[in-house]
Amino acid sequence: MEITPTAANAQRYANIVREKSMLRGLGQAAMDIGKMVTEEGGTPSEMLETAEKKIYDIRKGERGDSLEHIGVTLHKVFDTLTELSQSDSAIPGMSTGMRDLDKKINGLNKSDLLLVAARPAMGKSAFALNIGVNVAKKYNKTVAIFNLEMSREQLAMRLLAIESFVDGQKMATGKLTDEEWTKLGMASASLAQTDIRIDDNPSITVAEMNAKCRRLENLGMVVIDYLQLMSGSGYGKGGDSRVNIVGEISRSLKIMAKELNV
């Protein structure tokens, strides 16, 4: 009490308090995880998912208490409204790169799950990739692309075709003019500047996607192509119909979008 610290070092003191708080949170999470493993509270994959989430919440600085007073929530709402009023953008979310679509859906907003549906060979994949590239280039955000249908090389080829405006069929044969080679070179240099991550594991589950995405800094968008191909632990137990399985996957993806805030 006699030695009053000066306000000059307030930031350092705040950091010490925060670090100690994180250590306490980590200790508590470790005890919770140990107890869960000892009592076998679920399957190994479910326990691993819960453990990762606990550590992720500590990193994000979130408390375990999910009940929040409306007054606190309203403060956050007004902060968001103030931010929007000062923004130059006409939409609250990130742009898809297509103005008419942005007006309809208010852009790409955090915690949104957007499903693109159409008949086969109508351009769903190209459409989704276009949006992914736009977000990566315009907002300098990390974009994770999980493609269960194509290999990384095939996907990179499609991205090159989209970015360079060179016909994909011609690229497949490799018979290109000098001008087209130049376009490909420029498109490749442009794409290499973005932070687009590609995963081509055909049997990936939502839990595995979630775990991979948690480790990415500055994540803005996740593209999955396509949902019906997904499978894995926890889906289709007891001979569930494919409709129920897809419904469960969609639900898990919505939770993932909310948790990662992307």
Image: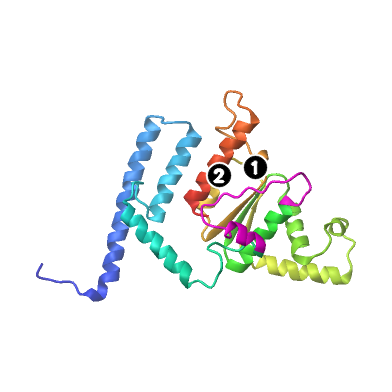
| Residue located at (37% from left, 31% from top) | 38
- Asked if the residue at tag 2 contacts the one at tag 1, i.e. Cβ–Cβ closer than 8 Å, the answer is yes
Q: Residue at x 54, y 40 (%)?
A: 251
Q: Amino acid at mark 2?
A: Leu
Q: Position of residue 85 (x, y in %)?
A: 47, 70
Is 152 colored magenta in this rendering?
Answer: no
Query: How far across and how far down the image is residue 171, in percent?
Result: 84, 59
Please give the residue where the numbered disc 2 appears in the rendered image: 253
Image quadrant in which the N terminus is located: bottom left
The segment highlighted magenta reads 100-124
Element at badge 2?
helix
Report whether 43 appears left or right of 160: left
Question: Quadrant of the rendered structure where residue 253 is?
Answer: top right
Amino acid under disc 1: Leu
- Residue shown at the point (72%, 46%) measured from the top left: 118
Q: Quadrant of residue 83?
A: bottom left
Q: How many marks?
A: 2
Tell me the chief SS of the magenta region.
Answer: loop
Write the residue at 67% across / 39% down.
Answer: 228
- Give the color scheme: rainbow, by chain, secondary structure or one colour: rainbow
Instruction: Give the CA separation, mark 1 to mark 2.
Output: 10 Å
Q: Is residue 68 visible?
A: yes
Numbered tag placed on residue 227 in the rendering: 1
User: Along the line of sight, which residue is nearer the eye, 197 or 81?
Assistant: 81
Residue 214 in the image: state x and y as whole percent. 50, 51
How many residues crowd mark 1 within 10 Å: few (<14), some (14–19), many (20+)? Answer: some
Q: Is residue 183 left or right of residue 214?
A: right
The answer to whether residue 257 is left or right of residue 17 is: right
Q: Which numbered disc flags the more N-terminal residue, 1 or 2? A: 1
Does residue 131 lie above or below 30 as drawn? Answer: below
